[in-house]
Image: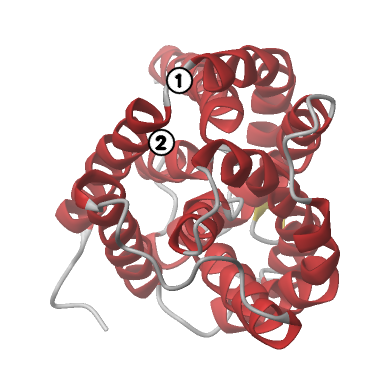
Amino acid sequence: MPEALDATLISLAVALMGAGAVAGLLAGIFGIGGGAVLVPVLYQFLGILGVDDAVRMHISVGTSLAVIVPTSLRSFMSHRSRGAADEQLLRNFIIAVPLGVLMGSFLASFVSGNSLKAVFAVIALFVALKMMFGKESWRLGTDLPGAIWRGFAGVMIGLLSSLMGIGGGVLNNTFMTLFNRPIHQAVATSAGVGVLISIPGAIGYILAGWGKEGLPDFSLGFVNLLAVALIIPITILVAPLGVKIAHALPKHILSRAFGVFLIVVAIRFFLALDFGAS
């Protein structure tokens, strides 16, 4: 029995490190924090370890947000050095996005794991279809809206991203491209949005899960510190490579690749839904 447990833990560690490498690469390529990779991987292996399903999705989301903190910082600094990010939009988001994140973290303590999975799958699929089949003519405007609407968009990006455990790149990329901004600028700016989401998001999930029953060892609220320690070093090392790839890819290839990736993620979570649960 101890040997079997040791083998399971080793497999978990290897899988987490592998997920960290993929997450870091995607953080640089797509301007995302890597949560769309980390959340399903964490959810799967927490199940193997016998973690209660009532808290498994919450821990996956909270841990993902904690991992995204250094990944997003590293990715944003790499993009910023190239002058690619829209820093004016980030200044507009500096209050709105964290406010949305805190709202989402508060809601997470009341909604079921099944509901979190549904939110993740539906939004990922919607954005994927837009990225895959959207045309250049699909625009909501020729430029980003004014400060009030930018603030509203920031709140929604923060709220939904905190419920999904992602760094906001999925939603911010869509927002910016719908308002005629190039995908490369959207990707670079999304890395900065990830910073605004991940820090308050991780804190919020720690508080939301404080004292909950069924948490695995090494957990601080809904954040598992062992997973964070295993994943973060790899994501930091790999993120700059993703940035180089992003700036080398043509716009249409980058958009379609992002769409394919999101469709795969959405399908995985739709398959994991329990439609009989509340």
Give percent across and percent down for residue 112.
Answer: 40, 77
Question: Which residue does the numbered mark 2 point to in the structure image?
Answer: 41
Q: Is residue 224 visible?
A: no
> In front here: 207 or 3?
207
Query: Which quadrant holds residue 255?
Result: top left
> In front here: 61 or 276?
61
Q: Is residue 275 left or right of residue 23?
A: left
Kindly report the distance in space between the C-alpha atoms of the residues bearing marks 2 and 1: 8 Å
Q: Report if the CB atoms under discs 2 and 1 are less than 8 Å apart.
A: yes
Residue at coordinates 71% horizontally, 47% vertically from top-left?
A: 66
Label 1: how many Cα within 10 Å (few below 14, some 14–19, many 20+): some
Q: Is residue 132 visible?
A: yes
| Residue 15, numbered label | 1
* Amino acid type at image mark 1: Ala
Residue at coordinates 61% horizontally, 68% vertically from top-left?
A: 144
Query: Which quadrant holds residue 67?
Result: top right
Label 2: how many Cα within 10 Å (few below 14, some 14–19, many 20+): some
| Residue 80, numbered label | none
| Color encoding of the figure | secondary structure
The mark nearer the N terminus, 2 or 1, is 1
Residue at coordinates 79% horizontally, 64% vertically from top-left?
A: 200
Give percent across and percent down for residue 75.
Answer: 72, 30
Image quarter (top left, top right, bottom left or bottom right) of the C terminus: bottom left
Please, is residue 212 above or below residue 38 in the view?
below
Give percent across and percent down for residue 198.
Answer: 72, 54
Please, is residue 65 above or below residue 244 in the view?
below
Q: Is residue 204 left or right of residue 265?
A: right
> In front here: 123 or 68?
123
